[in-house]
Image: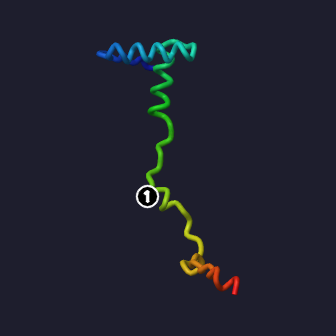
Amino acid sequence: MANLIVRNVDDAIVQALKARAGLEGISAEAEHRKILERALLRPAKKSFSEVLISIPSVGKDSDFERVQDKDVRDVFN
């Protein structure tokens, strides 16, 4: 397993990392590993257009034609 050294990290970030690690009951180093893993190894999200393209083609446009509701006046007359 490789080692990673991060230099010139702002003090506020280091303190936030330590605080977050403390809440989890783990070391700052372990929390750093978790953050990197979540950020870099999670599955990539699909774009909206990719989701639309993945929707299967079902039926014809006429299958989804809008049917007008009856006019309320027609129902009570």
Near-viewer residue (30 or 17): 17
Task: Tell me if mark 1 has few (under 14), some (14-19) or many (20+) residues whose alpha carbon lies within 10 angstroms of its own.
Answer: few
In the rendered view, tell whether residue 17 sits above or below residue 73: above
* Colour scheme of the rendered structure: rainbow
In the rendered view, tell whether residue 13 sits above or below residue 72: above
Q: Is residue 58 left or right of residue 2?
A: right
Report the residue at 32% width, 16% height from top. Answer: 10
Task: Residue 24: give x, y in percent of width and height.
Answer: 56, 17
Report the residue at 45% width, 32% height from top. Answer: 39
Q: Which residue is mark 1?
A: 49
Task: Residue 38: give x, y in percent of width and height.
Answer: 49, 31
Report the residue at 50% width, 37% height from top. Answer: 42
Res 12 → quadrant: top left
Q: Quadrant of the C terminus?
A: bottom right
Report the residue at 62% width, 82% height from top. Answer: 71
Outermost residue on the right side: it is: 76
**Residue 77 visible to the viewer:** yes
Count how many numbered circles sit on residues in the image: 1
Task: Residue 65: give x, y in percent of width and height.
Answer: 57, 79
Q: Is residue 2 left or right of residue 66?
A: left
Which amino acid type is marked by label 1?
Ser
**Residue 70 visible to the viewer:** no
Near-viewer residue (57 or 13): 13
Mark 1 element type: helix
Outermost residue on the left side: it is: 8
Near-viewer residue (57 or 23): 23
Q: Is residue 43 left or right of residue 10?
A: right
